[in-house]
């Protein structure tokens, strides 16, 4: 049996503080074997600097996935070749560096993690993820977990259904709001449309609401990061000895949902 914790989009300093405050307890309470976090928004809302890559490594995150903001901090290019826990979307431009699918040895199992960005309602810098999906689904592994970083729930469920005979979990990220549709599709693939955000709870995707409202009303105002109280969002997936997912459970901690391990 293997238990995997996947943490939804970690946003800014509030998100990093929530990792510091809760990760150790959650890993212990849920007897987690392997931890993945989407960290594409971890450095001031966009991208990932080396200092924060090292922070997550120190906190015990085994694998970090990215998304449409992967290359927003140029500093990434200085350390990406040495960042052996980092995975970037496979449907990025071919001129950009980075590994898109890695295998980790966990308790004798080969756990593959793959990252993609959606193409529905997203910017057009990423290719249609289906175009190369088979290539990754056919790679060697015992357990295959895919971070589908997409805007549209329709695209995420379609990707999961397509992958169900070959992948073990397809977990949605990017929209920052945890959905309540977690399930094991056809007893084959663990799925949730969105794992949710680890960042400021009363915010717009981690941004300060006053600055967001100004921008939405047409003012030329930059987004500011929110400094409101934090939220932790994740899922725990349990795989049996045959590498099949047997359960997926949501974790959501914020001012309205206090932490209690099941
Ligand atoms: Fe994103």
Image: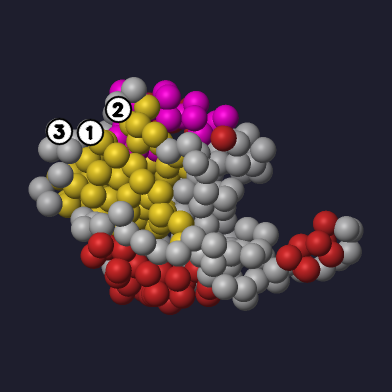
**Could you tell whether 97 is left or right of 262 in the image?**
right
Q: Are marks 1 and 2 in contact (CB under 8 Å)?
A: yes
**Which labelled disc corresponds to residue 242?**
3
Q: Position of residue 170 (x, y in %)?
A: 40, 37
CA neighbours of label 1 inside 10 A, class few (<14), some (14 to 19), many (20+): many
- Which quarter shows the N terminus? top left
Disc nearer the start of the sequence (1/2) = 2
Pointers 1 and 3 in contact (C-beta within 8 Å): yes
The alpha-carbon separation of the residues under discs 2 and 3 comes to 11 Å
Q: Nearer the viewer, residue 38 or 89?
A: 38
Q: Dot 2 lies on which element? A: loop
- Assess whether residue 169 is covered by the magenta stretch: yes
User: Magenta segment range?
Assistant: 154-170
On screen, 43 above or below 128?
below
Label 1 residue SS: loop
The residue under label 2 is 188
Secondary element at image label 3: loop
On-image quarter of the C terminus: bottom left
Q: Is residue 15 visible?
A: yes
> From the viewer's perspective, is 190 left or right of 208?
left
Residue beneath the point at 65% across and 71% down: 226
Residue 29's quadrant in the figure? Answer: bottom left
Q: Position of residue 198 (x, y in %)?
A: 49, 62
Vertical arrangement, residue 251 with respect to residue 124, above or below: below
Q: Which residue in the protein does label 1 denote?
A: 244
């Amino acid at each position: 049996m293997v238990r995997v914790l996947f943490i939804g989009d970690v946003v800014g300093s509030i998100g990093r503080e929530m990792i510091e405050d809760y990760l150790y307890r959650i890993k212990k309470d849920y007897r987690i074997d392997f931890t993945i976090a989407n960290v594409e928004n971890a450095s001031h809302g966009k991208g990932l600097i080396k200092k924060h890559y090292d922070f997550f490594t120190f906190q015990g995150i085994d694998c970090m996935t990215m998304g449409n903001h992967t290359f927003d901090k140029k500093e990434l290019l200085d350390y990406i070749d040495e960042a052996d826990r980092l995975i970037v979307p496979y449907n990025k431009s071919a001129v950009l560096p980075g590994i898109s699918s890695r295998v980790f040895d966990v308790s004798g199992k080969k756990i593959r993690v793959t990252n993609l960005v959606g193409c529905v309602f997203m910017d057009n810098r990423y290719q249609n993820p289906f175009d190369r999906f088979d290539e990754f689904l056919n790679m060697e592994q015992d357990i295959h977990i895919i971070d589908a970083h997409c805007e549209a729930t329709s695209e995420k469920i379609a990707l999961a259904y397509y992958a169900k005979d070959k992948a073990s979990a397809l977990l949605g990220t990017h929209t920052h709001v945890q959905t309540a549709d977690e399930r094991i599709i056809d007893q084959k693939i663990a799925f949730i449309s969105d794992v949710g955000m680890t960042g400021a709870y009363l915010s717009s995707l981690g941004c300060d609401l006053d600055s967001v409202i100004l921008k939405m009303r047409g003012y030329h105002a930059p987004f500011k990061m929110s400094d409101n109280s934090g939220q932790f969002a994740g899922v725990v997936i349990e795989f049996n000895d045959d590498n099949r997912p047997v359960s997926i459970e949501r974790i959501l901690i914020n001012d309205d949902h206090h932490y209690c391990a099941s």
